[in-house]
Image (tube, rainbow, N blue to C red):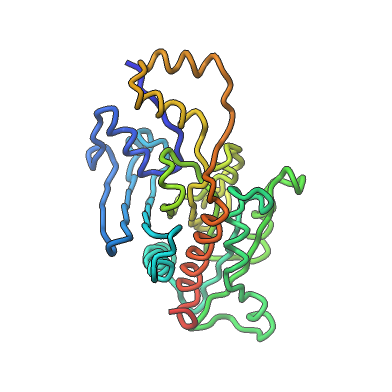
Amino acid sequence: MIFLKYRTDLAVEGVENLEETGARPGEKDGIIMEKEEIDEDIRVTTIDIVNMKGEAMLGKPRGRYVTMEIDGIIDEKEGIFDRAAKALAAQLSKLIKHHYHLKVLVVGLGNEKVTPDSLGPHTVSKVKITSHLFKIFNCEGDEEMSNVSGLAPGVTATTGMETAELIEKAVEMTQPDAVIAIDSLAARNIDRVSTTIQLSDTGISPGAGMGNMRKKLNEETLGVKVIAIGVPTVIDSRTLILEAMEQLKIPEEKAYRYMDSREFDMVVTSTDIDLVIQSFSDIIARAVNITLHPGIYS
C-alpha cells in the first residue's frame, strides 16, 4: 500500500502523518510526546526523539521539538502577544539559561526581500544586541543581560557566499556559548501558517522552508549548541494538491499518477503573510529578549 507523504518541517505534523497511516508512535519507538495547555489560547506539544528508531520514524535528528500553537494572533486578541512571548520564553529558557557570562549569537536566516522568507531578518532586527556594550565597558559579564551579537547573513543568491560559512566565521569572531537561529519553515496544514512556532535544540538547515536546503547549522558543524526557532510560512504545492485529492477520496495511485505527469515545484503562502511575519517576529524577539536579558525584560 502507498502512503501519501506530506512535506513538513514540523515534528508534530510528522507524528500526525504517522498516525494517519495507522501507526501510534510512542516511547517504545523512541518518541515521547507531551501536551500542555498554557491558557485558553496557547497550547504546547513537546516531542522528544530519544534514539535512532525515533529518528528514522520522524526523519529528524534526536532532540527536543516544542510546538506552540497560538490562537488570536491575526485578530490581535487582547494580550495575546505578551502572553505568547512569555510562554515561548518559558520554553526557550529550558534550552538556554541566562548566567553572568552568557554569550549568544542570534542569527536571522532568510531573504528580507521575499516576505515568506523574511522572518529571520525581521526578528533579529528587534532583538536587543549588547555585545558592543560589553566591549565599550570592558565587561566580562552581567547579572541582568547577556552578551548578545546579531547577524542577518542574507541568502547565497544575493550575497554570492555560502550562508553557513558566514555564520561559521561569525561564531569564530564572537565565541558564543550558543547560537539561536531563526528561520521560515514549511507546514502541511495551512492553519498552522498563522498559529504556530517550533522550537528545537537540534539545529536547522537554512532555506528549509523555501525548499532550498543548505548546509546544516548544528552543534556538530558550529561547535556550539544551536537552538532553532521557526514559523511555518509556506506550504509545498504538492502537499496541498495531494491533501485535496485525499479529501475528494481520489485513489492514491491516481493521485500519484496525476502528480507525476506534471511539475509542481512551487511553494505557496497565505494572503496575510506580511501580517504573519510582523506578528511572529515581534513575539519571537520579545521571547529572546526576555530569556537573554531577564533583568531588563522580565
Q: Nearer the viewer, residue 112 or 275?
A: 275
Q: Is residue 59 left or right of residue 206?
A: left
Residue furthest to the right: 160
Q: Which residue is pictured at 26% across the width and 52% down the height? A: 34
Q: Which residue is pictured at 45% across the width and 71% down the height? A: 291
Give the x, y percent position of residue 221. Answer: 57, 48
Q: Is residue 52 visible?
A: yes
Q: Which residue is pictured at 52% across the width and 62% down the height? A: 178
In the rendered image, which quarter contains the N terminus? top left
Q: Is residue 154 left or right of residue 288?
A: right
Say which quarter of the image contains residue 90: bottom left
Q: Nearer the viewer, residue 87 or 47?
A: 87
Give the x, y percent position of residue 258. Answer: 48, 15
Q: Is residue 113 left or right of residue 257?
A: right
Q: Is residue 164 visible?
A: no
In the rendered image, which quarter contains the C terminus? bottom left
Give the x, y percent position of residue 134. Answer: 63, 80
Q: Is residue 174 above or below residue 215?
A: below
